[in-house]
Each structure stands twice: as structure tokens, then as C-alpha cells.
């Protein structure tokens, strides 16, 4: 059964006895009800697509239509980016929308059909973006770091090769500087002791170049990367060290309860996020009158809303509150889409790889409130740390 575009005159409800403003309100209410029914029907159809069982929200269908309407025509991966939806859900929805003739495919790209455009217009979607052109939505610009930008980008160009076994996926050098600029703006750099947990983005190097922190410690399992970072920290005018370390083990005693700030960009799995955040919690000062803080990054593309709920709930249980979430703050490059979850869902059978960077994550700042306590304590060896389909 194919779905009709919502039409206020197809509702079967009589408006003959309603006039003026009342009529307008009633027409809008009927249209909204019919649109919602259509979105729910498409979401139900989408759940049957692909290979990985998932519940799909009508709100997600709305967001996919909205993204395509804004982009006009785009590759699948950029529809995921614009919509902020989980990649597997976006794939299922796109298949359902094409089957119902709301979306058509032209080469590598997807666009709304006439029927889809009519639906978007009846919803009242806005085609123009309200995102700030100066900061691209980051809320800050990196002019304050212009003196170190060229040097940092030169260092980044010489970084060691990526190692997929460690889930490495660096961000654009300008975004690493944006992280530091945001931290400076929030008062989390000058005179602070900062620990970086995993650092293929070289945030520790950018921090050291500012000469603002009191102390920097970076931990990473990649020995080659640590050697590279150590070489560049050795010339810093501040206390800085880089240590090869496996975060599946608790932090060494001399690094616990010692830092004002932690920064990490963990695997976007449920257990990966909780593990890295727990090590961050171990590192922070536990002084009652000091509100130590942490930063981490999390995507929508690989972390569905139920994972966000789990992580936010865990943060509260650990004694943290979220103070800032800036969407699409980080853009990653050299990212392979040949991942186990995408392959299992069947995405790569129908969707070609992206032609330009598309994978983004939010920057999230958390602050201690009361007693900070890690969710994972002790040694933690669990193969699901890198399982993106484990909830």
C-alpha cells in the first residue's frame, strides 16, 4: 500500500460550520494529524528494511525529509550528517521513502520527488540554514590561536599513519584548535592540570603550543603516536609528558585525583564511552570545593538516541552534569565506512562511499557535582568495547 501525501481536505471531516480563525486552527490540526500518521506509517515500513532489527521513530523520518529538503540533493552520508540521525536508521528510512516515492535517486545523490517536496511544504519546513557563517555553529572562532595555527597544522601533516585497530579517526586540525579555543573560553586551560585520554587528534600538542596550562599528560595505547607526541611536547615551556598506556587498566596511582580537566574522544560504543569517561573521572581532583570538568565527543551517526540516553544517565550517576553540547563541532577525515555495523546492515551494498568528509561529532563539556565516582572501576577487558551494535 502506497501512502498519500497529507491533505487537509482528504480528512473526511466537515468544516462547513466553522469560520474565520476557528477554521484555520481546525485545518492546521487536521493537517498535522494526517502528517503524523504518514510519518508513523513510513517509520513502520522503515523498520522492515535492512538487516539489523531497529525501532524507527516518526521524528527520525521527519528529520531525514527535513535534511534532504535543506540540502536539495546530496549523498547519503551528508544526509546523515545534516539530519543528525543514526546511520542505520537513516538508511532504513531512505529505502522506505524511495519505495513510497517521496525520494528519488540521481546517480550518487538523493533528492525529494515532487511528492516529497509537497510533503515538505505541507509540513512547513524551512529550506535555509540558520547556522552562523562565522563560527559554523561552534560558538567560537580560533582567531585567538592564529599565532600557533601554522605550526600546529605543519605538525599534524607529519602525524603517524592511522591504525584502525585502535579506532583512530583524526579530526581536521582547525577543529582541534577549535576545541582548545572553546576550552580557553570556558576557563579550562590557563593554569590548569589537563589529562588527555587518547590523542590521535593531537589536542595535547595544541594545548602545549598555547603555553597556557600548568601541566599536560597524554595517555594513548599507540606507541608510535606517543613517541611522536612526546617529541613535540619536549620543546614545550610547560610541564608535559606522553605515556603509552592501555585504558582498559585503571589509571596509575600517581595520575588519580590529580587533574582539573580531562579530554577524550572515545569509541562511540556504549562501553567505550563509559570506559573512557570512567578513566577521566578517576583522573579528576575530588576536592569538594573544586568543580573539576571533562570534555568528550559523541556522534549521532554511530550513537542512536537510546545510547545518548544511556550515557547521560550514566554521567549523572557518576556525579557529572552536562554544561555544554555543541553539535557538529568536530569533522573527521580519512574515515573508512567499511565498518562491521554498516556491512551487517547492508548499507555498502546500495550506497557508495562518501566523496568528502561527512562524519561529525558533538563536543560535550561535563562538570563534577558532588562526589565524582567512575562507573567502571578496575581492569576492564570486554570485547564489546568496540561493538557499535551493542547497546
Image (cartoon, helix red, strand yellow):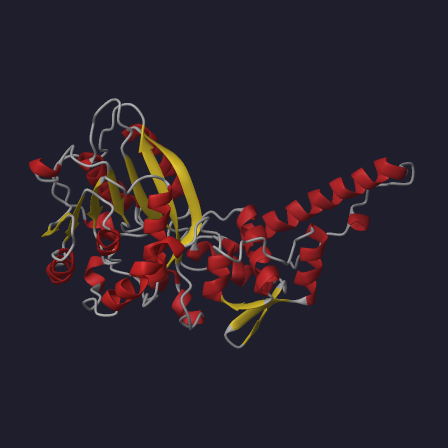
Identify the image quadrant of residue 250.
top left
Quadrant location, the C terminus:
top left
Q: Give how far across and how far down residue 379 sits, in percent.
A: 12, 40
Q: Name the side, left or right, on which 280 lies relative to 55.
A: left
Q: Name the side, left or right, on which 280 lies relative to 108.
A: left
Residue at position x 55%, y 56% in the image:
64
Residue at position x 40%, y 59% in the image:
51
Is any atom of residue 390 visible in this view? yes
Quadrant location, the N terminus:
bottom right
Q: Name the side, left or right, on which 372 lies relative to 141.
A: left
**Is residue 150 or residue 29 the one in the foreground?**
150
Q: How many marks?
A: 0
**Is residue 19 or residue 4 the one in the foreground?**
19
**Is residue 93 or residue 148 the one in the foreground?**
148
Q: Give how far across and how far down residue 301 sits, in percent.
A: 41, 55
Q: Name the side, left or right, on which 160 lies relative to 55.
A: left
> Relative to 11, does residue 161 appear above or below in the rendering?
below
> Relative to 314, does residue 295 appear above or below in the rendering?
below
> Relative to 374, does residue 148 appear above or below in the rendering?
below
Q: Give how far across and how far down residue 158 sits, in percent.
A: 21, 70
Q: Give how far across and how far down residue 69 sits, in percent.
A: 61, 61
Residue at position x 24%, y 55% in the image:
209
Residue furthest to the bottom in view is 107
Amino acid at each position: 500500500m502506497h501512502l498519500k501525501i497529507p491533505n487537509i481536505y482528504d480528512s473526511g471531516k466537515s468544516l462547513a460550520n466553522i469560520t474565520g480563525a476557528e477554521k484555520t486552527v481546525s485545518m492546521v490540526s487536521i493537517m498535522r494529524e494526517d502528517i503524523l500518521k504518514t510519518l508513523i506509517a513510513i517509520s513502520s515500513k522503515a523498520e522492515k528494511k535492512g538487516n539489523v532489527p531497529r525501532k524507527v521513530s516518526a521524528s527520525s523520518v521527519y528529520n531525514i525529509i527535513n535534511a534532504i529538503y535543506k540540502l536539495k540533493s546530496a549523498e547519503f552520508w551528508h544526509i546523515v550528517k545534516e539530519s543528525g540521525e543514526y546511520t542505520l536508521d537513516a538508511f532504513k528510512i531512505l529505502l522506505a521513502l524511495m519505495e513510497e516515492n517521496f525520494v528519488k535517486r540521481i546517480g550518487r545523490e538523493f533528492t525529494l520527488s515532487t511528492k516529497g517536496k509537497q510533503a515538505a511544504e505541507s509540513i512547513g519546513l524551512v529550506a535555509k540554514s540558520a547556522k552562523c557563517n562565522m563560527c559554523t555553529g561552534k560558538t567560537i572562532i580560533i582567531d585567538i590561536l592564529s599565532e600557533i595555527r601554522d605550526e600546529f597544522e605543519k605538525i599534524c601533516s607529519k602525524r603517524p599513519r592511522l591504525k584502525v585497530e585502535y579506532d583512530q579517526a583524526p579530526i581536521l586540525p582547525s577543529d582541534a584548535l577549535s576545541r582548545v579555543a572553546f576550552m580557553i573560553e570556558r576557563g579550562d586551560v590557563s593554569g590548569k592540570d589537563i589529562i588527555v585520554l587518547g590523542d590521535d587528534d593531537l589536542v595535547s600538542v595544541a594545548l602545549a603550543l598555547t603555553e597556557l596550562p600548568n601541566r599536560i599528560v597524554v595517555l594513548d595505547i599507540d606507541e608510535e603516536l606517543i613517541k611522536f607526541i612526546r617529541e613535540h611536547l619536549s620543546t614545550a615551556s610547560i610541564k608535559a609528558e606522553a605515556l603509552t598506556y592501555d585504558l582498559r587498566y585503571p589509571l596509575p596511582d600517581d595520575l588519580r585525583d590529580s587533574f582539573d580537566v580531562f579530554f577524550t574522544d572515545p569509541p562511540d560504543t556504549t562501553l567505550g564511552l563509559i570506559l573512557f569517561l570512567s578513566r577521566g573521572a578517576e583522573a579528576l581532583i575530588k576536592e569538594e570545593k573544586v568543580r573539576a570538568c571533562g570534555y568528550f565527543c559523541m556522534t549521532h551517526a554511530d550513537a542512536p538516541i537510546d545510547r545518548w540516553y544511556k550515557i547521560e544517565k550514566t554521567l549523572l550517576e557518576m556525579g557529572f552534569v552536562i554544561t555544554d553540547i555543541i553539535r557538529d563541532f568536530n569533522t573527521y577525515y580519512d574515515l573508512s565506512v567499511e565498518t562491521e555495523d554498516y556491512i551487517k546492515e547492508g548499507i555498502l551494498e546500495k550506497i557508495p562511499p562518501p566523496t568528502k568528509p561527512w562524519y561529525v561529532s558533538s563536543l560535550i563539556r561535563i562538570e563534577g557535582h558532588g562526589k565524582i565516582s567512575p562507573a567502571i572501576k578496575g581492569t576492564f577487558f570486554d570485547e564489546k568495547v568496540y561493538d557499535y551494535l551493542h547497546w
